[in-house]
Image: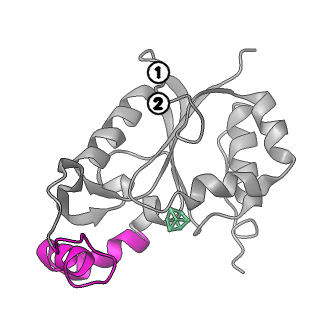
Amino acid sequence: MSKPKVASDWLAGCAGCHMSLLDMDERIVKVAELVDLRATPITDLKEPDASGVDVGILEGGVNNTTNEEVAHKMRKRCKYLVALGDCAVFGGVPAMRNFFTVEESLRRAYVETESTDENGRIPDDPELAVQTRVRALHEVVPVDLNVPGCPPDADVIFHVLSELAQGRKPVLTGKLLHWH
Ligand code: SF4
């Protein structure tokens, strides 16, 4: 049996969900042996095959047009799509800006704080073209599995990845999703 092809990427978040993969410790070796990793931002593998992969994993909320394009591209290429972490599942931390207008948020971030552009202006980088509100991944594309947590517990991540690697659909029970 061929190994399932896996790809991951991140949207608006802190990259903590990807970093939490390392919390699986030695179990990450076991998972790595079971899958064919085709693309992820934490290695030099950046672009999944145009022909597609079996499992896509997306971290982060949809904050701007670039995020939306990545979400659609991953959905198109992946047979099974996982929303990894609270930001992807319901918007999480980035969605806190939804209580404010886009202009208020950008002014707060770039003009009214100490850690600002030295010219005191909002950058015009196209990647900053934020949308009216941060959306959960499922609001943009169909999602097959939501994995909550900020970041998700290593036991949960291991369960999800090992089940998918063996061709099974993971079931997240209440016992597994305990909160610390
Ligand atoms: Fe970071 Fe938490 Fe969002 Fe994951 S869910 S990207 S750890 S803020």
The boundaries of the magenta stretch are 92-120
Q: Residue at x 28, y 74 (%)?
A: 116
Query: Which residue carries the number 1 mark?
Result: 52
Q: How dense is the environment of label 1, judged by Cα within 10 Å: few (below 14), some, or many (20 and up)?
A: some
Tell me residue 114's x, y (percent). Answer: 31, 83
Residue 109 shown in magenta: yes
**131 relative position to 45: left or right:** left
**168 relative position to 60: left or right:** right
> Does the beta carbon of the residue at mark 2 sit less than 8 Å from ligand 1?
no
Quick one: SS at disc 2?
A: strand
Residue 156 quadrant: bottom right
Query: Which residue carries the number 2 mark?
Result: 78
Q: Residue at x 37, y 69 (%)?
A: 94
* Viewer-proximal residue among 59 and 176: 59
Question: Do the residues under discs 2 and 1 have CB atoms within 8 angstroms?
Answer: yes
Which residue is most to the front? 118
Q: Which mark is residue 2?
A: none
